[in-house]
């Protein structure tokens, strides 16, 4: 299997506990997929998230963006614009994507150009 990176795109607002749990998960499984965060949080949640992002930067690739004036749709669009990866997957701040499964989906898409999306069983 070839390795194609999948950008994990996460819009969030004032849910730092959920987001931090998700980031720690990706670090614990040594995810090679970059994480892109679009955060509209207030100062308290922003500071909590930024501290954990700084702590985990050596373990996983995180691109943190604070966009307080954007709604969720605008944030999703902006994340799609800034993501630099072969593929992308949107997820909620309280959900988890399995990095190995993302790699399998990207590999499938790479080999099957007639498909535009791929997902596992859920």
Image: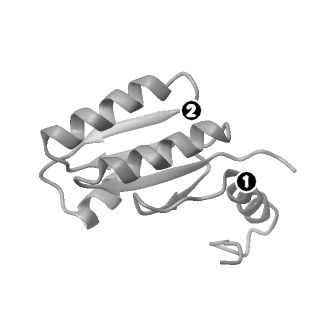
Query: Which dot, 1 or 2, sits closer to the camera?
Result: 2
- At horizontal 63% and vertical 72% (from top left) the residue drawn is 117
Residue 102 image point, x, y percent: 68, 57
**From this viewpoint, is residue 83 visible?**
no
Query: Which disc is residue 15 wearing?
Result: none
The number of callouts visible is: 2
Relative side of 118 to 48, left or right = right
Q: Is residue 95 left or right of residue 29?
A: left
For residue 115, side relative to residue 67 (left or right): right
**Hey, which residue is sitting farthest right in the picture?**
1
- Could you say which is closer to the camera, residue 79 or residue 66? 66
- Kindly identify which numbered label has been placed on residue 60: 2
Give residue 32's position: percent from left, percent from top: 65, 38
**Could you tell me if residue 38 is visible in this image?**
yes
Give the labeled residue for mark 1.
Answer: 103
Quadrant position of residue 20: top left
Return the residue nearer the eye: 79 or 17: 17
Q: Quadrant of the C terminus?
A: bottom right
Percent across and percent down for residue 11 are: 34, 56
Kind of element beneath mark 2: loop
| Neighbours of disc 1 within 10 Å: few (<14), some (14-19), many (20+) | many
Disc on the earlier residue, 1 or 2: 2
Tell me if 95 is positioned left or right of 101 in this view: left
């Amino acid at each position: 299997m070839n390795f194609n990176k999948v950008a994990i795109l996460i819009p969030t607002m004032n849910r730092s506990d959920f987001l931090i749990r998700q980031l720690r998960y990706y670090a614990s499984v040594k995810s090679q997929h970059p994480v892109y965060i679009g955060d509209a949080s207030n100062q308290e949640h922003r500071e909590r998230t930024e501290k954990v992002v700084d702590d985990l930067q050596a373990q996983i690739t995180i691109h943190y963006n604070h966009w307080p004036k954007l709604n969720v749709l605008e944030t999703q669009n902006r994340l799609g614009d800034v993501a630099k990866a072969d593929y992308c997957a949107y997820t909620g701040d309280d959900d988890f994507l399995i990095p190995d499964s993302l790699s399998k989906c990207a590999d499938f898409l790479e080999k099957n150009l007639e498909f535009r999306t791929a997902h596992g069983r859920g």
